[in-house]
Image (cartoon, grey):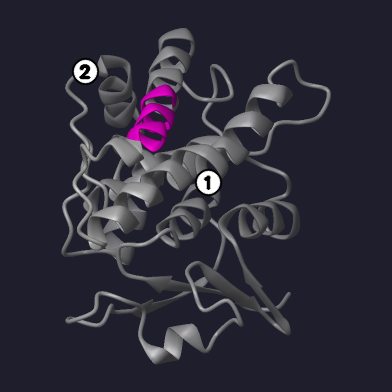
Amino acid sequence: MSQLVVHHLGVSQSERIVWLCEELEIPYELKLYARDPVTRLAPAAYKALHPIGTAPVITDGDVVLGESGAIMDYIIARHGGGRLAVKADSPDFPDYLYWMHFTNASLISSEMIRIVTGALGIPADDPRLAFSRARATRAFDLVEARLGEADYFAGAEFSAADIMMGFALTTMRVFAPRDLGPFPNIRAYLQRIGARPGYQRAMAKGDPGMTPMLS
């Protein structure tokens, strides 16, 4: 079998891939890349890995793959024996699919609007941002409601959907700060995932100088 290499850009979505590998307890090589201290962007060596130039990226022999969801599916299928995915005949399969895709398509995309407009100097209470604020509020309210129904996003058992969602609720807040005080179910959930040995190992290896954002 070819050597799986996880190229981890510090404090980024590639955290998910390190976490996945640790949860699956599969062999992999971890290569760490530090952000530019001034721009906080990826270094040239990381951008050169894949044409899109963003994290995450893995290499596996001749395979070079980007995008969190694609990488998660690839590793689970080729290296994980299907573990941490929910089977199509399971009643939890629709929820698994929904939350796997919700995280980047809805939750992180709405938070990215806040990041970009903030960088442009647009005040958070600018009336032009009312739509994006409402969308982000709906997203967090939906997450809070789901975690009031089940311990994990796909149901009673931890799955890859939790790894996808976990980043958006934790490290993403480095870039888009959000008070989780109004969300007790989310805060309780973060304590559950934070207690997982796989998560703890992943954060210690990938971002050893960072305190996980679990509250």
Residue carrying label 1 = 104
**Which of the 4 quarters of the picture holds residue 209?**
bottom left
Residue range (magenta): 130-138
Q: Main secondary structure of the magenta part?
A: helix
Q: Where in the figure is residue 155, as x and y percent of width and height?
A: 57, 18
- Amino acid bearing label 2: Pro
Above-or-below relation of 167 to 45: above
Q: Which residue is under mark 2? A: 182
Q: Which is more N-terminal, label 1 or label 2?
A: 1
The secondary structure type at the circle numbered 1 is helix
Residue pushed farthest front? 127
Q: CA distance from mark 2 to mark 1?
A: 22 Å
Q: Quadrant of the C terminus?
A: top left
Locate the N terminus and report the quarter of the image it occupies. bottom right
Q: Residues within 10 Å of mark 2 (few under 14, many from 20)?
A: few
Question: Badge 1: few (under 14), some or many (20 or more) residues near its Cα, within 10 Å?
Answer: some
Closer to the camera in the image, 215 or 172: 172
Residue kind at label 1, given as amino acid type: Asn
Membership of 93 in magenta stretch = no
Instruction: Tell me what residue is drawn at x 16 percent, y 51 percent.
Output: 211
Measured as percent of width and height from the top left, residue 188 is found at: 28, 21
Relative to 173, residue 31 above or below? below
